[in-house]
């Protein structure tokens, strides 16, 4: 396997074969690799995840506080 000049992602495979009559043949294959750009998936950083969890914790405490006050007022 070799690479052609100027084509970094296109290796050339050469195969020499002989048939039953003793005739040889050279076969050349070009393998082209198309690299697709990966899909961008939005994520949170470690600090973003920590802040999100703290906000969810605060919202949970506020929800429980309001539920407790409602039960007391009835």
Image (cartoon, grey):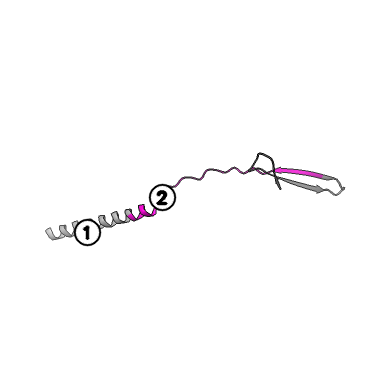
Label 1 to label 2: alpha-carbon separation:
29 Å
Q: What residue is disc 2 on? A: 43
Q: What residue is disc 1 on? A: 64
- Can residue 37 be seen here? The reply is yes
Residue 35 located left or right of residue 28: left
Q: Nearer the viewer, mark 1 or mark 2?
A: 2
Residue at left offset 55%, top offset 43%: 36
- Can residue 74 be seen here? The reply is no
Q: Which residues are magenta?
A: 25-50
Residue 19 located left or right of residue 71: right
Is the C-beta separation of discs 1 and 2 under 8 Å?
Answer: no
> Residue 10: percent from the left, percent from the top?
65, 42
Residue at left offset 57%, top offset 44%: 35
Query: Label 1: how many residues lie within 10 Å, few (<14), some (14-19) or many (20+)?
Result: few
> Residue 12: percent from the left, percent from the top?
70, 44
Image quadrant where residue 30 sits: top right
29 vs 50: above or below:
above
Total marks placed: 2
Residue 32 located left or right of residue 20: left
Residue 28 in magenta?
A: yes
Identify the mark at residue 11; answer none if there is no mark: none
Residue lying at the far front in this picture: please name it: 5
| SS for dot 2 | loop
| First of labels 1, 2 by sequence position | 2
Residue 74 located left or right of residue 61: left
Residue 12 in magenta?
A: no
> Residue 67: percent from the left, percent from the top?
19, 58
Query: Label 2: how many residues lie within 10 Å, few (<14), some (14-19) or many (20+)?
Result: few
Residue at left offset 44%, top offset 47%: 41
Residue lying at the far top in this picture: please name it: 6
């Amino acid at each position: 396997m070799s690479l052609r000049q100027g084509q970094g992602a296109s290796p050339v495979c050469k195969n020499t074969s002989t048939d039953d009559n003793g005739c040889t043949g050279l076969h050349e294959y070009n393998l082209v690799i198309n690299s697709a750009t990966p899909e961008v998936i939005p994520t949170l950083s470690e600090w973003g995840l920590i802040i999100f969890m703290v906000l969810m914790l605060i919202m949970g405490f506020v929800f429980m506080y309001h539920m407790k006050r409602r039960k007391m007022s009835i």
